[in-house]
Image (spheres, rainbow, N blue to C red):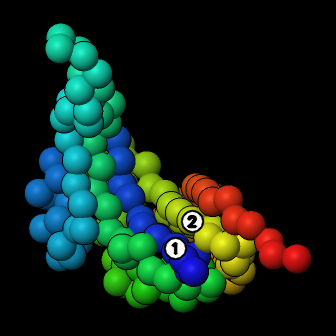
Amino acid sequence: MDKTEIMVYFKLYADDFPLEQVTERLEIKPTKTSKKGEIIRKISENENFTRSYSSWELGTDYKKSLDTGKLINQVIRQLRNKTSVINELKEEFGLESRFVIVIKINEGYTPGLNLDIPVIEFAASIKADFDIDLYANPYSVSD
């Protein structure tokens, strides 16, 4: 039986910006970065699908869990004392900020989705929004 999996990450993104400076100033190694124009996949011999923006991300891998709050807090714990730096970077480079929660529901096991007051307050302090992606994989129920 497959378990439900959750991944959470925070991202700073914009048209283009110096990723290395963000890493230096936050003093946090990102889990992923991407640059505008990078090839995402080849569509045909002469055409590629490319990134339309640059991003700096900090997050978890997929974890077997039914508790989104625990994973969100793992990410926020690393960022909590970086509020002023995040806001300075956003102002300087025109960055947007977002928390992304990706849930792969397997075998009908749906997780709780709880954004508690400290999470909401932190997101508000850096003007970050939330993007929640749900993928429900089919399952069969035995009689």
Residue at the extreme top: 46
Residue 6 in the image: state x and y as whole percent: 52, 73
Element under disc 1: strand
Q: Is residue 127 above or below residue 35?
A: below
Q: Nearer the viewer, residue 55 or 128?
A: 55
Residue at 20% x, 32% y: name it.
39
> How packed is label 2: few (under 14 Cα within 10 Å), some, or many (20 or more)?
many
Which three-letter amino acid code belongs to the residue tagged 1? Ile
Q: Nearer the viewer, residue 44 or 87?
A: 44
Residue at 17% x, 65% y: name it.
23
> How packed is label 1: few (under 14 Cα within 10 Å), some, or many (20 or more)?
many
Residue 32 in the image: state x and y as whole percent: 24, 60
Q: Quadrant of the N terminus?
A: bottom right
Which three-letter amino acid code belongs to the residue tagged 2? Lys
Q: Earlier in the sequence, mark 1 or mark 2?
A: 1
Q: Is residue 110 above or below residue 69?
A: above
Locate residue 99 relative to residue 110 in the image: left or right. Answer: left
Q: Dots 1 and 2: beta carbons under 8 Å?
A: yes
Residue at 24% x, 16% y: name it.
44
Query: Residue 56 occupies which quadrant of the picture?
Result: bottom left
Looking at the rendered image, the disc whose residue lies closer to the viewer, 1 or 2, is 2
Q: Nearer the viewer, residue 138 or 104?
A: 138
Query: Residue 54 occupies which quadrant of the picture?
Result: top left
Residue identified by numbered label 2: 104
Q: Which mark is residue 6?
A: 1
Locate residue 57 relative to residue 9 in the image: left or right. Answer: left
Q: Which mark is residue 77?
A: none
Residue at the extreme front: 143
